[in-house]
Image: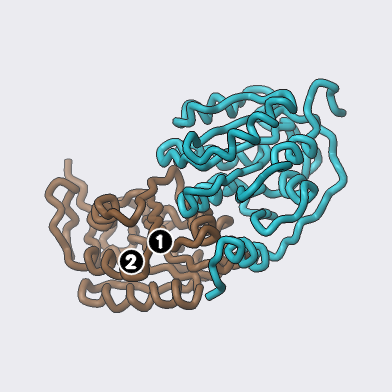
Chain colours: A cyan, B brown
Amino acid sequence: MSKANLLDRRQVVNTLLADRKDALVVAGLGASTYDLAAAGDHARNLYLWGAMGGAVMIGLGLALAQPKLPVVVVTGDGEMLMGMGSLATVGLQKPKNLTILVLDNEAYGETGGQVSHTSASADLVGVARACGIPDSKEISTLGEIEAFAKLMQDVTSGPRFANVKIDGANLERVLSNRDGMFIMTRLRGALGHAPI
Amino acid sequence: MHARAEASNEPVAAWPEEIFAILQRYDVRQVPYVPDAGHSQLIQRVLGSANMRGIPLTTEEEGVALLAGAWAGGQKGVLLMQSSGVGNCINMLSLTQIFRFPFLTLVTMRGEWGEFNPWQVPMGSSTQGVFELSGIRVLRATEPAEVKDVMEAAASQAYNACTPTALLLSQRLIGTKVFVK
């Protein structure tokens, strides 16, 4: 039941990462992880298949450890709602290289499409701003995503937050690797860290 | 039994300094925490350190996820919390098995030694069991003189062997919180 004026999630993520350069990307569980896989597997991708509510905090730990690299968290509205406190933690730490993008379909798409709080009352942009991330905005066009993709490369002006209203289409799953040790070791290897 | 004073006239104990020195030696960089009076001395040392970053959390599970991200980026960390926060972490502790990163948490215990507040007792009683069911090895320090050795063992197995470890700092060690009108 997609509405014509809403963005397609795969197009959003593809556009965001088309020229990702050295960016490290964390995807929240469910459709966001499939979107990241659909945009192309990459050693600098950290796919989550669980740990709901933890995507932004994983991104924060990564951003603080690698302050010269852009770190991007792509997650859904349900995952973000569960980890809303982490926006306050990011607001306090103010990592200049962290970008958070929420794909907001106003529903729990993975579990049957039950509506989420953002469908009626919760405003995640308002939450992020009130938590100390002044660069927080609603995005509604692919042109804005292109501009945001350039901004996310700037590791001196974050943190930044964007909420993108996407259509509710349930797309074919593109399954990423789901072996955490492989994903972790590969990402660390890409940054020059050997296994123990 | 030691009476635990409020922060303003906190007696300076030796063991928090010993913990700090071991964390320094293991090059621990990220120190997420939800404050506890029993951790106040260590938190002060972390916040005053040039190479460690103290990171206040809104809830303890944030710290588990943060440390996974830190390790992905090449840094080690330690999570400071009190026993009541352990229950908040349960699902996020899955990350320690999925990513097998060097997870160490230092937990100040409540609800187990002359506790005044009954609300601390249920979670304090199940803290060790919750960790063990979640695949976290548990070590405990009860006497000030043993903290250094136990901490050394905990840090070694966590950071050298990527064995997720919780060090419980007994309420007897940190002192029973005194409630006065």
Q: Can residue B116 be seen here? A: no
Residue B116 place in picture, x, y as percent: 27, 53
Three-letter amino acid code of the residue under disc 2: Leu
Label 2, on which residue?
B23
Question: Looking at the image, which residue is at 13% across and 57% down?
Answer: B11
In the rendered image, residue A180, in percent from the top left (x then y), is placed at 66, 64
Across and down, in percent, residue A175 comes to 80, 55
Q: Which residue is mark 1?
A: B78
In this view, B65 is above or below A111 = below
Q: Quadrant of residue B141?
A: bottom left
Q: Is residue B66 above or below residue A194?
A: above
Q: Residue at x 73, y 24 (%)?
A: A141
Residue at horizontal 76 percent and vertical 40 percent from the top: A14
Q: Is residue A173 left or right of residue A77?
A: right
Q: Amino acid at mark 1?
A: Val
Check disc 2 and report its element: helix, strand or loop.
Answer: helix
- Closest to the observer, A81 or B72: B72
Horizontal side of B63 relative to B35 (left or right) equals right
Q: Residues within 10 Å of mark 2 (few under 14, many from 20)?
A: many
- Please determine whether, in this image, residue A181 is positioned above or below residue A62: below
Tag 2–tag 1 contact (CB < 8 Å): yes
Left or right for A133, reference A79: left
Q: First in sequence: mark 2 or mark 1?
A: 2
Mark 1 secondary-structure assignment: loop
Q: Alpha carbon of mark 2 to alpha carbon of mark 1: how far? A: 8 Å
Q: Is residue A4 visible in this depiction of the protein?
A: yes
Q: Chain of mark 2?
A: B
Corner quadrant of residue B95: bottom right
Residue at horizontal 84 percent and vertical 23 percent from the top:
A3
Q: Nearer the viewer, residue B17 or A62?
A: A62
At label 1, counting other C-alpha atoms closer than 10 Å, the crowd grade (few under 14, some 14-19, many 20 or more) is many
User: Looking at this view, is A168 or A101 the one in front?
Assistant: A101
